[in-house]
Amino acid sequence: MDTLTGLRSTTSGADVGAPRGETPDFDAFVAARSTHLLRTAYLLTRDTALAEDLLQTALTKAWFSWSRIEGNPEPYVRRILVNTFASWWRRRWNGEQPWAEPPEPAPAAGGHAEADQRHDLWEAMGRLPRRQRAVVVLRFVEDLSEAETARLLGVSTGTVKSQTSKALAKLRVDPSLAAPITTPASSTEDPA
C-alpha cells in the first residue's frame, strides 16, 4: 500500500498509528499544517527538495508515534523537524545541491524593491551558521519564545539569546542589507 493510512492497517494487524481521542487524525493534520511545516523546513535548509525530504522524514517519524501524541501535535512534529535537520547536519549530509532558485511569490504592484530586499535578506540568512539560522527562523518567523526555541533546539535559553544576538549583529553589518526596507505607505507620504 502506498498511503500512510494503508500502512497503518497493515502493521501487525493492530491499529498501531491510530490517534487517541482528542488528537486530530494524522491525515487531517498533514492536510492542514504541512504547508506551514514545509515553509519552516525550507527556511532551515534553503533548498526546496531538501525541505520536502526533511518534512517527509519528520512526518514519517511522527506517524509512528502518533498514538502517543496528546493534545496539539504541531509542537511535537516541529521538534522532530528541527531535530532531524540538526541530525542531518551533524552527519554532514548535504544531499543534492540546488541548481535553481525557489519561485518567489508574485509581487504586488510596485513591489519589486520589496521582493529584492526579501531576496537579499534570505541570502544573508543563508550565510549565517546553521544554529544561528535555526534560532532566527524559530524566534522571528515561527514567533516562538526564547524558552520554546531553547526547548526545541535542546539548548539553554542563554544559548538562544547569544545566538540570536550574534545572528542579528551579522545581519546588521551585512553589506547586501544596507538599504532600508521601504513600504508602499512610507514611499507615498505627503510632504505637507
Image (cartoon, helix red, strand yellow):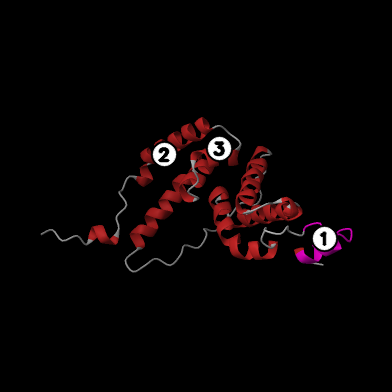
181 on left or right of 188: right
Q: Is residue 7 magenta?
A: yes
Q: In the image shown, does 1 or 30 lie closer to the viewer?
A: 30
Helix, strand or loop under label 2: helix
State the image coordinates of residue 113 (x, y, percent, origin top left): 34, 59
Query: Label 2 crowding class (10 Å Cα cut-off): few <14, some 14-19, many 20+?
Result: some
Q: In the image shown, does 182 or 73 lie closer to the viewer?
A: 73
Q: Which residues are magenta?
A: 5-17
Query: Label 3 crowding class (10 Å Cα cut-off): few <14, some 14-19, many 20+?
Result: many
Q: In the image shown, does 1 or 169 lie closer to the viewer?
A: 1
Question: Which amino acid lies under the numbered mark 2 shown in the image of this protein?
Answer: Leu
Question: Which amino acid lies under the numbered mark 1 shown in the image of this protein?
Answer: Asp
Earlier in the chain: of badge 2 and badge 1, it is 1
Earlier in the chain: of badge 2 and badge 3, it is 3
Residue behind mark 2: 168
Question: What whole-number distance in Å separates the C-alpha atoms at marks 2 and 1?
Answer: 47 Å
| Residue 14 at least partly seen | yes
Residue depicted at x 64% and y 49%: 76
Which disc is residue 15 wearing?
Answer: 1
State the image coordinates of residue 88 (x, y, percent, origin top left): 67, 43
Question: Mark 2 touching mark 3, by CB under 8 A?
Answer: no
Which disc is residue 90 wearing?
Answer: none
Q: In the image shown, does 96 or 80 lie closer to the viewer?
A: 80
Question: What whole-number distance in Å separates the C-alpha atoms at marks 1 and 3?
Answer: 34 Å
Q: Nearer the viewer, mark 2 or mark 3?
A: 3
Q: Is residue 62 magenta?
A: no
Residue behind mark 3: 150
State the image coordinates of residue 184 (x, y, percent, origin top left): 28, 61
